[in-house]
Image: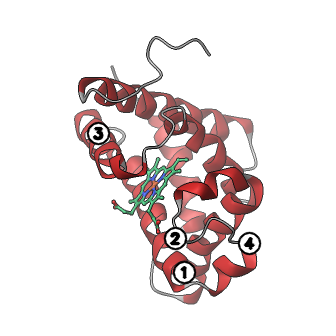
Amino acid sequence: MTVDKNDVKLIKDSLAKVMVGTGAENLQHGRDFYKYFFTNFPDLRVYFKGAEKYTAEDVQKSERFEKQGQRILLATHILANTYEDLEVFKAYARETVTRHRQFKMDPALWLAFFTVFVGYLKSKNAIDDDETEAAWHRLGKIFNEECQKHLKASGLPSTEGQTA
Ligand code: HEM
């Protein structure tokens, strides 16, 4: 399977607008992800121990989410930058699942994450066309397939075999 080069370009161009880094603007991009996440998907705060009731204002003031904001942004940049090197991309998907094992997440969230992330990119005006959105969802589909395979192989609950 080969990945569409235009998809890679669209994805990277969107991420260029939420670049990681140490500057005030970069740190704010990261915080903004969790502000968007917790405001629009408040039920998912349950996985973030101690932050289950965090508002956007709490995230803004939090050192934990300043750091975590950079981690999640870096992770999405890694997805974009490894996408054409599919075996590396898939290995990163498996590693991500392994690192989240302790959170006992609903397996459906591995795909749902991309709805959250696309919503965040739109909120940052980093996506303003359907093609880029579709490109992210194609990436998410491949990422999720590998996550579900890995969950299954690890004997953990997966969406494989579940009806939607
Ligand atoms: C809706 C889906 C997801 C949920 C609910 C979730 C939840 C979490 C939680 C609870 C933490 C610990 C942070 C803390 O409590 O301060 C975490 C860390 C992290 N997550 Fe996620 N996560 C999701 C999807 C993803 C995806 C798709 C990626 C990668 C593309 C990712 C990458 C990371 C990274 C890099 C960390 C930092 C810790 C580490 O590297 O192991 N997460 N996540």
Q: Is residue 79 above or below residue 125?
A: above
Mark 1 vs mark 3, CA separation in Å: 27 Å
Mark 2, secondary structure of its residue = helix
Question: Which is more foreground, mark 2 or mark 4?
Answer: 4
Circle 3: residue type? Arg
Mark 1, secondary structure of its residue = helix
Mark 2 vs mark 4, CA separation in Å: 15 Å
Q: Of the two numbered discs 3 and 2 on the same chain, state the one appearing first in sequence.
A: 2
Mark 3, secondary structure of its residue = helix
Circle 2: residue type? Gly
Q: Residue at x 73, y 73 (%)?
A: 56
Number of disc labels? 4
Q: Which residue is mark 3?
A: 94
Tag on residue 27? 1
Q: Residue at x 49, y 38 (%)?
A: 110
- 103, 129: nearer the viewer: 103
